[in-house]
Every structure is written in structure tokens, then in C-alpha cells.
Image (cartoon, rainbow, N blue to C red):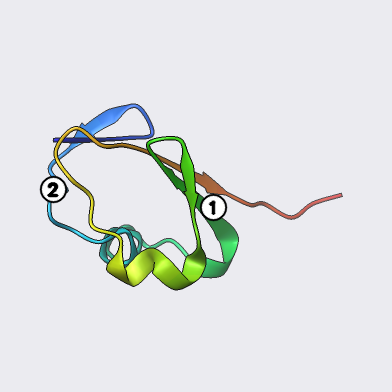
Amino acid sequence: MVKINGRDEDATGVTVGQYLDEEGFSFSRVAVEVNGKIVCRADYGKTLMKDGDEVEIVSFVGGG
């Protein structure tokens, strides 16, 4: 299991990019951290999530 934003998810073996696509996130409007390290947007497609990983996904919202 992978802990994503505090919830256990069955995402072992899935790339960050695949997960974001499946969940409907826009790559340009999120920041992703895996085990305390920021993942570069260019690496989303090759960063595999492993059992025990802790992932945080933060969405940017515009406003004023």
C-alpha cells in the first residue's frame, strides 16, 4: 500500500503520472512529494510508487 495524502491506496507499481491521470489531476496545477522529496514534473512518468511510500499531492488554486 502507498499512503497518498494520508490515505492508504493500492498504487504500488504505478507511476506518479499514471496516478495523477487516473485521478484527474492536471500536471501543471500540482506539486508531488514522495517520501519527503519533491518530484520534478518531468519525472512523473518514470517515478514508480513502491509499497510503504508516503506521497503528498498538493493542488494549486488561483484566486484573489
Of 34 and 30, nearer the camera is 34
Q: Residues within 10 Å of mark 2 (few under 14, many from 20)?
A: some
Quick check: 21 above or below 5? below
Secondary structure, mark 1, is: strand
In the picture, the quarter occupied by the N terminus is top left
| Residue pointed to by mark 1 | 31
Along the line of sight, which residue is nearer the eye, 39 or 7? 39
Q: Residue at x 35, y 60 (%)?
A: 20
Q: Circles 1 and 2: CB distance less than 8 Å?
A: no
Task: Please report the residue visible at 54 percent of the width from the left and 56 percent of the height from the top.
Answer: 30
Of mark 1 and mark 2, the one earlier in the sequence is: 2
Percent position (x, y) of residue 9?
Answer: 19, 38
Q: Amino acid at mark 1?
A: Ala
Q: Residue furthest top?
A: 6
Residue 32 image position (x, y, % from top left): 47, 50
Residue to which mark 2 is pinned: 12
Q: Position of residue 55 (x, y in %)?
A: 36, 40
Q: Which mark is residue 61?
A: none
Q: Separation of disc 1 and disc 2 at Cα?
A: 20 Å
Q: Is residue 33 left or right of residue 59?
A: left
Amino acid type shown at disc 2: Thr
User: For the view shown, which residue lies furthest in the right direction?
Assistant: 64
- Badge 1: residue crowd in 10 Å (few <14, some 14–19, many ≥20): some
Q: Position of residue 22 (x, y in %)?
A: 27, 63
Left or right of 61 in this view: 6: left
Left-right relation of 10 to 56 = left
Identify the residue at image location x=26%, y=37%: 53
Find residue 52 and report its image quarter: top left
Asked whether, in this view, residue 50 is left or right of residue 18, the answer is left
- Secondary structure under tag 2 reads loop
Seen in the picture, residue 19 relative to 49 is either above or below; the reply is below
